[in-house]
């Protein structure tokens, strides 16, 4: 019994507290609404009172005969005062007999009888101060709202007519419509309980002496009350405020049923909690009763729980060790790229030195020297292959562009894709059978698709569908805004769609940023889309992403079309290789921050007959060009200190000298150009480079002009 009684007693207490809190909040909202409406009503009344002051200043010294004689001029003066008021109103001069003499507007008609209005009658009978009445609409029009009047003569003189102002109903109703909540309505009351203006129309009731609102106003008690002062037929939560020191009051009434909604949802929650707690207590009692029957069973359960806990600790330790290994591998991958770049510089210096010795010794080299030099070149070649493996691990290797059949690649890649995903994720292919070939690096394209699939898997923790489709696409210039590597025209499109959680706009806008991640610490490097972005941009393509919370994500890769020939690489034929080129009559500007590599390049080019200038960084090279140094060809490293990369240097050199040839070199050329937006814009070779490769590629970059005669060998 106690297991059920205690929770339900708690439920009753919580329900009562919630009811009290809801009522208190509703009362507070009603008082706040009445307070704001009071301030607005006070502003309107003060503005109207100021207009009556100006009317008194204008006519106070005039007799009624003079007023009648100047009626036309005074009417224009009244209209000017009316137009200067923030709220629309009508000013009227009323004779002692209650007849209207002058008004700013067409209503009321001249000599209209206003003597029956309560406020004018009270002023005639000796009332001092301001009187308020509902404005008769038959005299002042349908838009009239509240009439405010005061005697024309000072207190020391007998009654001499009335200064009358008629405020439009919208002066109050517009603000009331903005403030109303929960179906509530505002009203403007006079001190005697007469309703001057009411939101929503209807008759204007007079509150009786025993009405709760009339009593509260008389006692000055401004707390919210429950009453039905306007005869709505249902209890109302009513709050009121006095308008300054005027005999006016703003009231706000809202139905209790809407201001204090039924406690059904809260009661249901409390009942569910109480029932759940009662069941839990009864279940606990039952378990205790069962446990008391057999101490042996209790010990066995404890031992079983301890075993499960030890197993869970062991599994967690294995998972944490795997996570630490993954983090070490990520750090090693980032470190490997920088080490490989420096290693390539060293290999370039060694290979260049060996080749320089071969050229220097020529036929004078004995067999032992030739064998040592050949061993050096072989060692450099092995080191270059090892470095290429390191760059592949670090995802910084140069790309190999070929014609790729995207449909065939996806069909062949589908089994691996399915193995990389959970069993809860289904994969579908929708392939355009007339799809043309695209120009891409097949291995990097597979890596990009795998990256997108893994991101989609992480976005579908409860399973879902991954749909990959191919189609032909045509991108307009506006679709490529901000992508200088791609050109408007036809593309092969590969769409990867998932039914995952999607991304909010702030995440979608930063999804391609390197190292941006929505995952917690130790859960990976992030969305990983920067690699896909750089790869596609590097081959002259485009990436688009569409996503919204709860609607999944679609990433579209737009790949450039392949070349007409099957063996094309990057869309152009490979340049022919020749044994050597004469550089006589040509000049080269070598820019390299590594002194040993710079010395090797200078010697190599000078031996071939080129006139050579050297600079350690981009700013120095630009200064030489601006000073007029002769340079037909720029041969520069890509990644250099000083804030200017080789790509930046090449662009600035082309701006200064549009015909200059450009050849770039880098230890991880593909990534460097992708980072700086130079893929496809300039020729590039990887380090370490051989003399034949450099001379062949430099020969292809020489400006178009008549070549000097080459001396016969």
Image: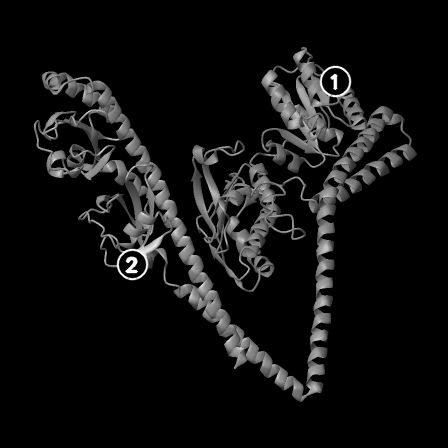
- Residue 494 lies, with reference to residue 428, above or below; the image says above
- Direction from residue 334 to residue 27 in the image, left or right: left
The one of 666 and 411 positioned closer to us in this rendering: 666
User: Badge 1 is on which residue?
Assistant: 612
Q: Mark yes or no: residue 426 visible.
A: no
The answer to whether residue 170 shows anywhere in this view is: yes
Q: Is 277 placed above or below 252 here?
A: below
Q: Secondary structure at mark 1?
A: strand
* Residue 292, image quadrant: bottom right
Q: Nearer the viewer, residue 379 or 687?
A: 687
- 299 relative position to 194: left or right: right
Rendering coords of residue 19 (x, y %): 42, 62
Q: Quadrant of the C terminus?
A: top right
Residue located at (36% from left, 59% from top): 261
Classed neighbour count for the residue bearing mark 2: other residues with Cα under 10 Å, few (<14), some (14–19), many (≥20): some
Sequence-wise, which precedes: disc 2 or disc 1? 2
Q: Which residue is mark 2?
A: 235
Percent of width and height locating residue 508: 52, 44
193 is higher (above) or lower (below) than 460 = above
Q: Quadrant of residue 191?
A: top left
Which residue appears at 46% of the width and 54% of the height?
A: 550
**Residue drawn at the location 12% of the way across and 19% of the way down:** 71
- Compared across the picture, whether 143 is left or right of 316 comes to left
Instruction: Determine the residue located farthest toward the bottom in the rendered image.
Output: 293
- Along the viewing direction, whichever of 468 and 77 lies nearer the viewer: 77
The image shows residue 551 at horizontal and vertical percentages of: 45, 53
490 with respect to 366 (left or right): left
Element marked by disc 2 = loop
Question: Disc 2 to disc 1, how far (Cα)?
Answer: 99 Å
Dots 2, 1 in contact, CB < 8 A: no
């Amino acid at each position: 019994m106690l297991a059920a009684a205690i929770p339900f007693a708690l439920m009753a207490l919580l329900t009562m507290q919630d009811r009290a809190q809801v009522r208190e909040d509703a009362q507070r909202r009603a008082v706040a609404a009445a307070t704001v409406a009071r301030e607005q009503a006070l502003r309107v009344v003060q503005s109207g009172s100021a207009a009556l002051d100006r009317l008194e200043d204008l006519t106070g010294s005039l007799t009624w005969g003079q007023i009648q004689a100047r009626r036309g001029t005074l009417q224009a003066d009244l209209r000017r005062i009316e137009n200067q008021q923030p709220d629309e109103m009508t000013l009227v001069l009323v004779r002692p007999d209650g007849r209207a003499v002058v008004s700013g507007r067409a209503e009321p008609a001249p000599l209209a009888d206003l003597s029956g209005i309560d406020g004018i009658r009270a002023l005639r009978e000796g009332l001092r101060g301001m009187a308020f009445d509902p404005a008769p609409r038959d005299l002042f029009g349908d838009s009239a709202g509240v009439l405010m009047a005061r005697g024309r003569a000072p207190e020391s003189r007998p009654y001499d007519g009335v200064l009358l102002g008629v405020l439009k109903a919208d002066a109050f109703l517009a603000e009331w419509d903005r403030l109303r909540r929960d179906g509530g309505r505002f009203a403007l009351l006079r001190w005697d309980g007469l309703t001057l203006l009411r939101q929503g129309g209807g008759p204007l009731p007079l509150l009786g002496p025993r009405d709760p609102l009339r009593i509260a106003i008389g006692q000055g008690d401004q707390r919210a009350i429950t009453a039905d002062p306007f005869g709505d037929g249902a209890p109302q939560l009513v709050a009121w405020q006095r308008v300054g020191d005027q005999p006016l009051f703003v009231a706000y009434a809202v139905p209790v049923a809407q201001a204090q909604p039924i406690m059904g949802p809260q009661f249901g929650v409390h009942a569910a909690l109480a029932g759940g707690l009662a069941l839990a207590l009864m279940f606990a009692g039952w378990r205790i009763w069962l446990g008391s029957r057999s101490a042996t069973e209790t010990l066995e359960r404890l031992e079983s729980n301890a075993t499960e806990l030890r197993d869970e600790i062991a599994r967690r330790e294995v998972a944490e060790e795997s996570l630490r290994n993954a983090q070490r591998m990520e750090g090693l991958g980032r470190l490997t790229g920088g080490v490989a770049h420096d290693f390539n510089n060293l290999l370039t210096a060694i290979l260049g030195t060996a080749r320089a010795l071969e050229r220097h010794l020529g036929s004078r080299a004995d067999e032992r020297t030739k064998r040592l030099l050949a061993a050096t070149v072989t060692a450099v070649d092995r080191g270059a292959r090892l470095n290429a493996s390191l760059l592949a691990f670090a995802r910084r290797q140069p790309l190999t562009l070929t014609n790729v059949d995207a449909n065939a690649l996806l069909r062949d890649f589908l089994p691996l894709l399915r193995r990389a995903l959970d069993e809860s994720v289904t994969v579908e292919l929708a392939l355009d059978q007339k799809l043309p070939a695209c120009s891409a690096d097949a291995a990097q394209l597979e890596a990009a698709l795998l990256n997108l699939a893994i991101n989609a898997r992480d976005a579908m923790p409860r399973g879902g569908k991954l749909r990959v489709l191919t189609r032909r696409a045509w991108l307009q210039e506006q679709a490529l805004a901000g992508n200088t590597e791609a050109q408007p025209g036809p593309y092969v499109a590969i769409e990867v769609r998932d039914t995952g959680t999607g991304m909010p706009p702030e995440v979608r806008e930063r999804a391609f940023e390197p190292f941006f991640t929505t995952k917690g610490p130790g859960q990976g490097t992030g969305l990983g889309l920067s690699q896909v972005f750089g790869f596609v941009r590097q081959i002259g393509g485009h990436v688009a992403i569409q996503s919204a919370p709860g609607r999944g994500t679609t990433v579209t890769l737009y790949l450039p079309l392949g070349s007409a020939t099957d063996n094309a690489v990057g869309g152009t034929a490979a340049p022919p290789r020749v044994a050597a080129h004469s550089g006589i009559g040509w000049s080269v500007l070598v820019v390299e921050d590594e002194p040993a590599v710079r010395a090797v390049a200078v010697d190599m080019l000078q031996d071939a007959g080129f006139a050579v200038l050297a600079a350690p960084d981009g700013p120095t090279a630009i200064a030489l060009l601006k000073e007029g140094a002769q340079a037909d060809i720029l041969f520069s490293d890509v990644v250099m200190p000083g804030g200017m990369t080789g790509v930046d240097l090449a662009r600035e050199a082309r701006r200064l000298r549009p015909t200059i040839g450009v050849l770039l070199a880098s230890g991880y050329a593909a990534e460097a150009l992708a980072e700086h937006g130079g893929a496809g814009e300039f020729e590039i070779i990887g380090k370490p480079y051989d003399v034949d490769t450099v001379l062949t590629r430099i020969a292809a970059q020489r400006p178009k002009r008549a070549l000097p005669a080459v001396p016969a060998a």
